[in-house]
Image: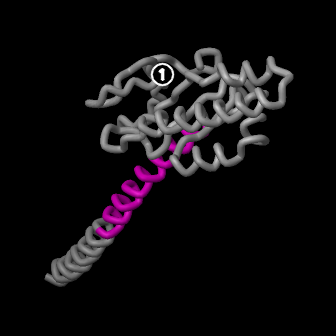
Amino acid sequence: LRSNGLVEGVHYLKQKQLGETTLRPDILLLLPNKKQVPIDVKFPYSEMQKLSLTDSKVQQKVHLKQFEIDLKNKIKKVADYIDVGNGTLDYAIMFVPNEAVFSFINQQLPEIVDMAVGKRVLLVSPFTFLIVARTILESYRHFMIADKLREVVVHIDDFVVEWEKLRGSFEKYGKTLDVLQRDYQAV
């Protein structure tokens, strides 16, 4: 995060309790208006390691099944961080710390990816994490700017209405002054 220009305390917080809950995501991505995106970087890696170390097809199936169970449980825990009432957006991020594992999950366990999406949990790899984080920050900033822009447009519309009233009053007083000027000249 730091190496990509994000500043702790400004753009993110580490190990901060989520509102009034006992939940403590690893990272909270800070957004305008006190909104935040929880990020979990702990990953259930042990079964994946066992899977890669065994040559036995039976053991591979056992480790793959357990890895799938561990992933599902982790996704459910990450989904618990989503608490709009405590200032989060309606999704959370689960960091997969290895590109190969991320690719394996997407290719071999697409139902896990679907489950994560259904629970509003974004799975990200080291490569995609900063892209997602920056996109969230910029999108939310643009959303806030668009929201403020709507307010400005309302104020401009109100100003135009008031300006037209003022201009109409000046025209009316201008005509009155012209009439007075002609009458004065006549007198």
Residue 180 lies, in percent from the top left, at 17, 78
At a point 74% along the width and 28% down the height, the residue shown is: 101
Where on the picture, by quarter, is residue 67? top right
Q: Nearer the viewer, residue 157 or 61?
A: 61
Q: Image point 61% across, 28% down: which residue?
A: 95
Q: Position of residue 107 (x, y in %)?
A: 78, 42
Report if residue 168 lies within the magenta region.
Answer: no
Image quadrant occupied by the N terminus: top right
Residue placed furthest toward the left: 187
Comparing 186 with 67, the one in front is 67
Work out whether residue 128 can be spotted.
yes
- Furthest-right residue in this view: 55
Q: Who's the residue at 60% across and 24% down the image?
A: 44
| Magenta stretch in the rendered image | 135-161
Residue found farthest to the front: 58
Residues 9 and 120: in front is: 120
Residue 138 relative to residue 55: left or right: left
Q: Nearer the viewer, residue 82 or 141?
A: 82
Give the residue displayed 58% in from the left and 31% down from the top.
70
Decide: few, some or many residues near mark 1? Use Cα within 10 Å; few <14, some 14-19, many ≥20. Answer: some
Q: Quadrant of residue 31?
A: top left
- Residue 150 on the magenta segment: yes
Q: The residue tagged with tag 1: helix, strand or loop?
A: loop
Image: 142 above or below 71: below
Residue pointed to by mark 1: 26
In the rendered structure, the answer to whether residue 5 lies left or right of residue 165 reads right
Q: Position of residue 39 (x, y in %)?
A: 51, 29
Q: Is residue 133 visible?
A: no
- Vertical placement of residue 110 versus 45, above or below: below
Instruction: Give the main secondary structure of the magenta stretch.
Output: helix
Q: Position of residue 91 (x, y in %)?
A: 49, 43
Q: Amino acid at mark 1?
A: Asp
